[in-house]
Amino acid sequence: MTATARPPDAASTRAVPSVPSSRRAVVAGGIGNFIEWYDYGVYAALSPVISSLFFPNESTVASTLATFAVFGVGFVVRPLGGLFFGQLGDRRGRRTALGLALILVSASTLGMGLLPTYAGAGLAAPLLLLLLRLIQGFSAGGEFTGSATLMIENAPTGRRGRVSSWQQFSVIAGTLAGVLVVTAITNFGSAGMLESGGWRIPFLVALPLGAIGFYIRFRMEDTPHFQALRDADEIAERPTAEAVRTQRGAMLTAFFFTALPNIGFYTFLTYTPTFLRNEAGLSLGDAYVVNVVGMITYALLTLVVGRVSDKVGRRPILITHAVAFFISAVPIYLLMSSGSFWVAVVAQFPAMMIMACYSGPGTAGLTELFPTRLRYSGMALPYNLSSALFGGTAPFIATALIAWLGTPLAPAFWAMAAAIPTVIVYLRMRETAFEPLQDR
């Protein structure tokens, strides 16, 4: 998968992003990511409540598994969303695809806040929840890769790591916002407020957020790189088919590129409140506080490491991420399962530093693998397949492994297994930080 850098083509020389356009792209791309992962953060943080309201069962493990199974189902349709939005984005423009994705995720998240519970609607309640999760998953299939494309194609030379790290920051910030809202309701509301209807509030917030995001995105022009291709009449007619034919190496790299980071994100972050409550015995309020500390640390470190990757390259930092994850997964889970609130807090700092070694350079490194002509489509399919296989299943697998092996360290073993193919891909991929962004 090694390759030498090519000289910039004619379209590349015409596409010169500016600092102001990169700032607008950060806001426009980040707002949809924020809403998308705000919902994921809310759903994961509320999983103990959702499991009792939508999947009542005498077994806590069974209820939790059912809740995370629905969480994972949303990922199953992400590859379909990636196909649809990738085609749309490479043919009609990034702005059109991202606008539609934002409408779908906002509407489905709002719908979750209006759902009846099992007590009120019986089996219809979890089925409706499942339907909305499918819609969210479909929209997410175009959101992440589309916003990454938008930011990278608006980033000035030498600043792609810095600019694209804001894409990961928006993911973390959205997840954090979801957890913060749930934490506030839990810690400052009356006893039982979540179960009695307070769980709806975080989902209903999606309506005003979506309206703001839609306004911002449709005021922005398409990226300079995409406009240059369109002006030259070089837009791909069948971008996905062309990507499969000409970008197989890059697509295979992209699939394993995010395997370990997906497991890390959805276990170290979204699964943490459930893990700390069920396995470490912390109260739900304390578990949320630990999670918030970790996410704030993660968000700040992501921006720092993204800037560093523009100086030292993507590969050294990504390799560090995979190796450190393999070595540290068991010790970190051992600390988190100790039963001590403060030990769990301290464990967040090494865990989030390791995660930031992906989130800082990862978006840039992944996006730079593909040319503008096929970037959205070429990246969307392998990324979403990887997310479905490794990310959406992570909380479910973590819960199942703990029950099967009888140890809270079980999730670490799954992460260690994924670290092996991931580090091989990082070792073999070319360094893209110092190359011009290719258009063809």
Image: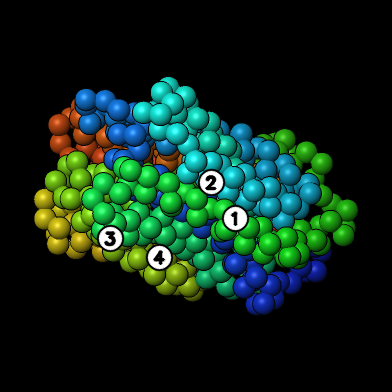
Q: Disc 3 and disc 2: Cα gap in Å?
A: 23 Å
N-terminal label among 4 and 3: 3
How many marks the image carries: the answer is 4
Q: What's the residue type where badge 2 is placed?
A: Leu
Residue named by callout 4? 299
N-terminal label among 1 and 2: 2
Query: Which element carries disc 2, helix, strand or loop?
Result: helix
Relative depth, front residue between 373 and 43: 43
Q: What's the residue type where badge 1 is placed?
A: Gly
Q: Nearer the viewer, mark 2 or mark 4?
A: 2
Relative depth, front residue between 432 and 307: 307
Q: Disc 4 and disc 3: Cα gap in Å?
A: 25 Å
Residue named by callout 1? 210
Which mark, residue 352?
A: none
Query: Which element carries disc 4, helix, strand or loop?
Result: helix
Q: What's the residue type where badge 4 is placed?
A: Ala
Residue named by callout 2? 110
Disc 1 vs disc 2: Cβ atoms closer than 8 Å?
Answer: yes
User: Residue 273 at x, y = what percent?
Assistant: 27, 49
Which mark, residue 188?
A: 3
Q: Disc 1 and disc 2: Cα gap in Å?
A: 10 Å
Q: What's the residue type where badge 3 is placed?
A: Phe
Query: Which element carries disc 1, helix, strand or loop?
Result: helix
